[in-house]
Image (cartoon, rainbow, N blue to C red):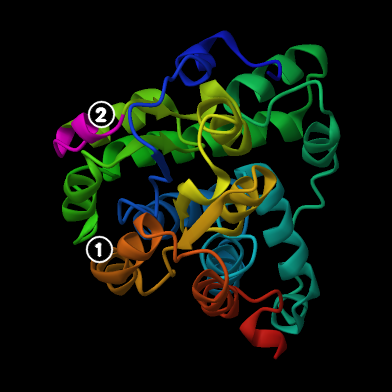
Amino acid sequence: MPDYPEAARPLAELSPKHQFFVGIDSDGCAFDTMEIKHKECFCPNTIKHWGLQPVSKYAREAAEFVNLYSKWRGINRWPAVVMVFDLLRERPEVQARHVVPPEAPRVREFIADDAYPKSNDGLKAYMAERPDPELERAWAWTTGVNQTVADMVHDVPPFPYVRESLEFLADKADMIVVSATPVEALTREWEEHDIAKYVRVVAGQELGKKALHLELAARGKYDSDRILMIGDAPGDMNAARANDALFYPINPGYEEESWQRFHDEGVHKFLAGEYKGAYEAQLVAEFEKLLPEVPPWKR
């Protein structure tokens, strides 16, 4: 058993009640919260705090590409914001306006320092050791994002067919939430919509990374072809692959269709042992095609 945070003990101690196991991501997968969080919370704060007002149109395009419509969908906010700056710096339209996006050397150093988690608490601890005006700006940005999320993101129900799928699996599989969102926010969301009752553990960022959630909860406890991760980002697929588990993609932009297909078809193939192989490969190929590496303005 790997080292794990004390908070992750419920995962390590999870004892199978069924032969099947399903992990489910939350933001952008079970709930339609990715779009509102990035478009209404992250984008405005990035433009406001990093001086991108003169190129707001391009800043928004870059931020939405990185966080929603590329292979980096779902990555941590710190490498994501630096990637946005780098994409902007390359754009002729930005150069023509004589706008120089931040180089963010101190933020890059924070990202590269493995001793500090890439969270607000991690940044706070890092700043205590290395005070710097750029990090003060970064703190204003990240706390501004969280405040806007708290104000803006509520009353967002699960996607159609999520509840129906959970109900169907309730007596057939052990289910947990596998997410990088703080546990408090996850629990509130799942309880608000009365679907927390279907999962045995709500695992968020305090319990470690997604791959660790799956490793502690499922690996070695279930046959690998009976462990399924449902997610909307490459990081979810990587977590599944790291544990030799199966992956069901919720396609960005086609979430309702993906959940209906899972409810009507995918879950039955999984339970019948017919998921692994050609069926999964076809779904993954479709998913990866939706999340390119090259932004549209470079194609």
The percent position of residue 36, horizontal first and vertical second, equals 35, 56
Q: Nearer the viewer, residue 75 or 120?
A: 75
- CA neighbours of label 1 inside 10 A, class few (<14), some (14 to 19), many (20+): some
Q: Which residues are magenta?
A: 192-199
Q: For the view shown, which residue lies furthest in the bottom direction?
A: 299
Residue hosting label 2: 188
Residue hosting label 1: 263
Residue under the image location 24 percent in, 69 percent down: 264
Residue under the image location 25 percent in, 28 percent down: 188
Residue 157 visible in the shown view: no
Q: For the view shown, which residue lies furthest in the top direction?
A: 6
Residue under the image location 73 percent in, 52 percent down: 82
Q: Nearer the viewer, residue 2 or 32?
A: 2
Quarter of the image where one finds residue 114: top right
The C terminus is located in which quarter? bottom right
Q: Check disc 1 and give the amino acid type.
A: His
> Quick check: is 272 in the magenta stretch?
no
The percent position of residue 130, horizontal first and vertical second, equals 82, 19
- CA neighbours of label 2 inside 10 A, class few (<14), some (14 to 19), many (20+): few
Q: Check disc 2 and give the amino acid type.
A: Arg
The percent position of residue 54, horizontal first and vertical second, equals 60, 68
Q: Secondary structure at mark 1?
A: helix
Give left or right: position of 34 versus 222. left
> Quick check: is 195 in the magenta stretch?
yes
The percent position of residue 85, horizontal first and vertical second, equals 72, 59
Residue 90 visible in the shown view: yes
State the CA–CA distance, disc 2 to disc 1: 25 Å
Q: Secondary structure at mark 2?
A: helix
> Which label number is shown at residue 81?
none
Quarter of the image where one finds residue 23: top left
